[in-house]
Amino acid sequence: MQTMTRCTLSLAAVSLLMATSAAWAQQAPPVRVRGEITKVEGNVLSVKSRSGENLTVKLAEPMRISAMVKSSLADIKEGTFIGVSAMPQPDGTQKAFAVHIFLDAQKGVVADRHSEWDNRPGATMTNANVATTVSGNDGQNLLVKYKDGEKKVIVPPGTPIAKYVPGSAADLKTGAKIFVGAAKKEADGSLTAPNVAVGRDIDPPQ
């Protein structure tokens, strides 16, 4: 009887461990990929990451490809939906080190929010609509609003600014820089990605 009880408890413990592991796997954060394409085979990309890793990225079918092109502050107006990579300042403002302008079609698809960002230690990402824009002593001052709040953003002169445009398979070529925001790591170590952003005349500034 004791042996059966111990066996039952052991099975229960294993079941709990497996359930916990499965839950953790389901909640595993997406993998972000920043790097350069070294090879293209259909919808499979060989990529050398910014940190020097050699990665295999398989794009979902049909492939969803966006291109990124150089832009400027002149394209950022009231109502423009943007993403701001920034460093928080002591006074509560966000000092941008990169800005990207979303397509109108991405409004409502890309979440508007303020969160931590892994581009560099301590960085943030704010996806929001521009409420106001005025020139300041240190650059352009933007007030951006998202679902749960607002932020004052300073865009210093020389900050890389890019905008999304529709892309195609022709943009996927050796040497092109890419950004994948939500890849999934597979058991064999490869990555699957629902979409990819490819830099045409500017590196994706995420």
Image: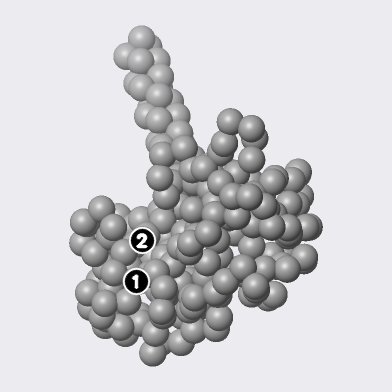
In the rendered image, which quarter is residue 102 located in? bottom right
Residue corresponding to mark 1: 177
Is residue 11 in sight in this rendering? yes
What type is the residue that disc 1 sits on?
Answer: Lys
Residue 162: image location, x then y, percent: 52, 70
Instruction: Report how far apart the C-alphas of labels 1 and 2 lie in the structure.
Output: 8 Å
Taking the spot 22% from the left edge, 57% from the top edge, the residue there is: 53
Whether residues under marks 1 and 2 lie with C-beta atoms below 8 angstroms apart, the answer is yes
Residue 72: image location, x then y, percent: 57, 71
Is residue 127 in sight in this rendering? no
Give the mark nearest the N terminus, 1 or 2: 2
Q: Front-most of 3 and 86? A: 86
Taking the spot 45% from the left edge, 52% from the top edge, the residue there is: 30
77 to 84, vertically: above or below: below
State the residue lying farthest toward the top.
2
Using a 10 Å C-alpha cutoff, classify the residue at mark 1 as few (fewer than 14 neighbours), some (14 to 19) or many (20 or more): many
Q: Front-most of 96 and 3? A: 96
Q: Label 1's element?
A: strand
Residue 8: image location, x then y, percent: 40, 22
41 to 36, vertically: above or below: below
State the residue lying farthest toward the front.
137
Q: Label 2's element?
A: strand
In the rendered image, which quarter is residue 41 located in? bottom left
In the image, taking residue 121 as reference, residue 157 lies left or right, namely: right
Taking the spot 58% from the left edge, 31% from the top edge, the residue there is: 90
Taking the spot 45% from the left edge, 29% from the top edge, the residue there is: 16
Q: Which mark is residue 34?
A: 2
What type is the residue that disc 2 sits on?
Answer: Arg
Using a 10 Å C-alpha cutoff, classify the residue at mark 2 as few (fewer than 14 neighbours), some (14 to 19) or many (20 or more): many
Image quadrant in which the N terminus is located: top left
Residue 103: image location, x then y, percent: 64, 74
In the image, taking residue 145 as reference, residue 53 lies left or right, namely: left
